[in-house]
Image (cartoon, coloured by chain):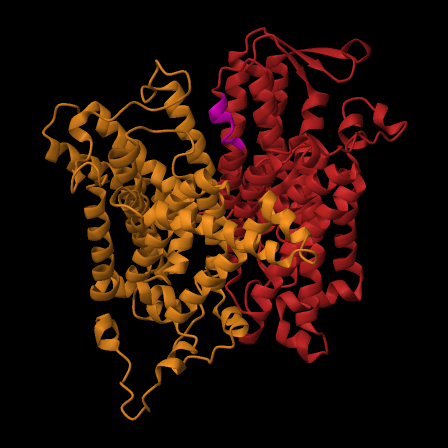
Amino acid sequence: METLAPAAERAEPAVVDAPKERWWTTLRTARPEVVFVLSLFSGLVVSAFVIVISLKPSRAAWGELFSHPGHTFSVTAHALRKAYGALLSGSLGSTGAFGHTLTAAVPLAIAGMGLVIAFRSGVFNIGAQAQMIGGAVLASWVGFSFGGWPTPVHVALGLVAAAAGGAAVGLIPAFLKTRTGASEVIVTIMANYVMAALLVYLISNTFFSQRQNSSPVGRLTAPSGTWPSLFGRSFGVNAGLIVAAVVLGGGWVLMSKSRLGFELELSGTSPGASANAGISPARVFIVAFVISGAVVGLAGGVQILGTTHQLQSGFGGDIGVLAITVAFVGRNRPIGVLLASLLYGILQTGSLQMQGSSGVSYQLSNVIVGIIVLFMTAPALVAEIYRLRPAAGANLRLAMSRGWGK
Amino acid sequence: MRGAPRWWKAFGLLVVFAGLLAGMAINAANRVAILVLGTKNIRSHPIVHVHIWELCTVCAVLAAAGAAAVAWSGGRRWVVRAAIAVGLPALLLGYLSWAPNGSRVSLSNILVATVSGSIPLLLGSTAGVLSERSGIINIAIEAEFLAGACLGAIVGSISHSTVVGLLAGIGGGMLIGAALSVLAIRYGVDQIVAGLILITLVTGITSYVTEQTLNPNQATLNSPPTFGALRIPGLVDIPVIGRALFGQSALLYLAVAAIIGSEWMFARTALGLRIRAAGENPAAALGSGVNVRRLRYGVGLVAGGIAGIGGSYFTLGSSGAFLAQMTAGLGYVALAAVIFGGWRAGRAALAALLFGFATSMATSLGLLNVNVNPSLLVMLPYLVTIVVVAGAVGQAKAPAADGVPLAET
């Protein structure tokens, strides 16, 4: 079947006689990279307003704008320099800080890639939190109950369990969609709440619970199942980094180099054509949900076995939401996911130091992320604000969901 | 599933309900449930002693009758829905009387909690129906709830007035509604994506404001006055249902007005017809001179305002103070009510009541000493949503142009 040629052979014909673009013209064109930088810039600018309004000294200084304008600007500049300076130094300022940034980025990159696989297949998987919990619960069980096994076997087993748990949770919305037509958007969102409640139940009332602790937490992973740290203890990065690298690379191979990935993506972008080519939409739905769920489940396993070592209530909530925006900001590409998760790692890690040294709550990082993702998904808005020229051939619109339809 | 009739799921579900109830009736032996028909003062209200097996049998018969009606009517849509809407509460009522051992079960209290728990869902689902009938998928109800709750609490605290707070809450909802409309209509962003992003952004901003500003100034910025119960004289004294329907927060009556108003608008007015046209066939609407864009912007604003009232209920209507992420996904539940209600305001309201019942059930069962873990009970409304959405889809159709940008039609 010629219609199923690998993705690489679909490359658009090269434009031979196009005039060479000047670099400043490139910078003023609505290319994805330009839009990304401008979105980041806009996020920081809007957040600067939020910082100034929410801090007492700077708010007071703006009250004296007309009597002491110099004072107003110096107080504002000081507040912003302190907050954003702490954001940077807390995330990139030392090897230890950079290690924390990488550690925060790893589960985001893995879960983000898992969601990208679903989004590119036309499957709207919003259930990253549920699938991470599924993966984490099984991985944690392997982690604390198979103590004493050789470390390589134990770690590998934990990985397999995490993937299986995530895939199992991912199967529920896939099954309901193919059997009853229930919108996967609603089912995956509801699954997040159900799994969060199930997690609380498991760690407070079952053998998962660490009983001597008064607040509900899960049992600690056995030493043999705990992931080794890379590059020495002070750097603080565990073997999850390798998993993230493998997942991003594997995701790229799957979606851009393999026949299965091509079928998934064809079904996502043009369902009619793919159905005509003999690709079953139900099969695509189930396969995409299982792969995506398994990868997201890995993120849960990495987080449990590498970083937190035990289940806690609320696990996966932040990462589950952020992973969706990682996929959006990364424009559904592995390299984009890598950059977006690094950026989020910087924001998350740096915001903790920002709270300590400048009194701006760490929650500001979520505001910055929200604005960045808002601009990234509305490139036409960025193009209008910054008067960018339309980019030739670049389809900036990120259409993914298919409404309530099939 | 070739050969199986379309209604086999609903039929099977109801048969299972009836079976469970019959099992409870047999298991109940001679135990007696004490049903309290009032709430305020137990002594002044009638108390009924009912044999649990009788109650469970009645409920089982109701569920079985629902199953029979479904089969007999050949799975007509409204029969299926009515049967589920009777069967599910029957199952839960039977369970509620069977599970606790000798505790008092107050019917009136359960009904009061059902209706009050449904208020935000009623408003949210009406907002969802409005914007989806005009062709904009509104997943951002959760964001409109959060914005309404947060602004309502802050402005209510500063002004010491529930009404001013409510107006601010409406404004907050309208702001999000406007943002969604602009993203969807002007910039052509995928509507589900736009909704999710607004939810992320509003969650981030409200959590930040809570941490940074509200928590240190709890007394001045985050302790708004709340709407008391508005008792309608005479009607509120009707036994069992009186307080649930006629002794609630003023916001309930706003919700009822919104539901009746939108049903009337869609059924009787030219404006309703234009909105429906914009959602079903925007090209034809454009051709007949309807300004579809302007219509969708207007509906988005009004829907945002209505959802903002629903958001205000979380703070000004019930608990007072705003907490980060206090809406706990109820915006999505309201969205599910829209789907289960087949994109009709009245039916969506019934679906919202069903979810409100599941929510109040979770709390009622938690209060009685029922042998079920409270963290499992928390799941109940979300599980009911999944089951109901899985059962309902395919029976109702979304407006044809729901979620389709105007440029593509």
Nearer to me, B99 or A355: A355
- Chain whose colour in the figure is red: B
Whether B311 is among the magenta residues is no
- Chain whose colour in the figure is orange: A
- Relative placement, left or right, of B102 versus A42 is right
Image quadrant in which you'd find residue A218: top left
Whether B376 is among the magenta residues is yes
Image quadrant for the C terminus of chain A? bottom left
Is residue B203 shown to the viewer in this render? yes
Majority secondary structure in the magenta region: helix
Rendered residue at 15%/32% (across/down): A154
Image quadrant in which you'd find residue B397: bottom right
Residue A231, position as x, y percentages in the image: 16, 42
Which residues are drawn in magenta?
B374-380
Residue B125, position as x, y percentages in the image: 65, 47
Q: Is residue B147 above or below residue A121?
A: above
Residue B16, position as x, y percentages in the image: 49, 30
